[in-house]
Amino acid sequence: PHSRDLAGVKVVVSAGPTREYLDPVRFISNPSSGKMGFAVAEEARDRGADVTLVTGPVNLPDPPGVDVVRIETALELRDAVLAAARDAQMVVMTAAVADYRAAERSDEKQAKVAGDVTIHLTPNPDILAELGRQKGDRVLVGFAMETHAGVERAALKAQRKNADFILLNYPTREGTAFGGDDNEVTLVRPDGTSEAWPRLSKREVARRLLDEAARVRQKAES
Ligand code: C5P
């Protein structure tokens, strides 16, 4: 089902980490490399889609032929994804969004003090869930990283966020997920059905992800 099967389809992909600043020079983040999301964006582009890639800070160049929006914080990611998603038919959330941000971001560098400090964190909005609440006929795809009870938790997550499916990965498998060129994921649907895929390149995972998204779209149309 490849070649130009996504011609005329608008796809939004989020990638990479977010940075949640405590002050101008310090932030909370995670080691997401962005490779999975960039692979999805490139694969969708090669299949003819009109692609917007919203990415946090990563060491990857803009893929040619893709509309790239660079953001830093979860709130910026939210604005960019929601704006791009308005006229999109598929949204793939691979970004490793920080769950919390500083309740107050200082405009000045915080001086070191003697002893312990307490940082007050406040939850970030869940962008995938927000898209799920205004789903329309968009296909919504999420990722999840779990260390245990992965399939059940991912199925519940897909239900709760109203996603069509979630790709579950494990942070502990060597050479996969964070930073690696390969990924080993399990496709999990909200009805609890799942498919464990073998270890594959992130590009091949992207191919299968888009095959599944295209199937969901066809089913909804028929
Ligand atoms: O709940 P959890 O963070 O495990 O969900 C992961 C999925 O939800 C990913 O697809 C991620 O991009 C998305 N997400 C989001 N907004 C958040 C947190 C996660 O869209 N604030």
Image (cartoon, rainbow, N blue to C red):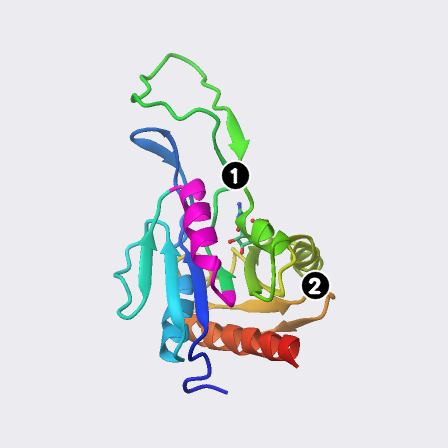
Say whether disc 2 or disc 1 marks the residue closer to the N-terminus. 1
Residue 67, by quadrant, is bottom left
**Residue located beneath label 2 in the image:** 190
Where residue 86 appears, as percent x and y from the top left, is 48, 58
Instruction: Give the vertical position of 153 relative to 98 (above or below).
Output: below
The crowd level at tag 2 (other Cα within 10 Å; few <14, some 14-19, many 20+) is: many
| Nearest to the observer: residue 113 or residue 131 | 131
Whether 116 is among the magenta residues is no
Residue shown at the point (25%, 61%) measured from the top left? 61
Q: Give me the residue at 44% from left, 53% from top.
A: 83
Residue at the right extreme of this rendering? 191
- Give residue 142's position: percent from left, percent from top: 55, 60
Please, what is the dominant secondary structure of the magenta stretch? helix
Q: Secondary structure at mark 1?
A: loop
Q: Amino acid at mark 2?
A: Pro
Q: Residue 136 occupies which quadrant of the picture?
A: bottom right
Q: What segment is highlighted magenta in the picture?
A: 73-90
Q: Is residue 88 magenta?
A: yes
Label 1 crowd (10 A; few <14 / some 14-19 / many >=20): some
Is the residue at mark 1 in contact range of ligand 1, meaning its CB lies under 8 Å from it?
yes
The residue tagged 1 is 124
Q: Is residue 46 left or right of residue 11?
A: left
Report whether 155 appears left or right of 109: right
Q: Identify the element where label 2 is drawn.
A: loop
Q: CA distance from mark 2 to mark 1?
A: 23 Å
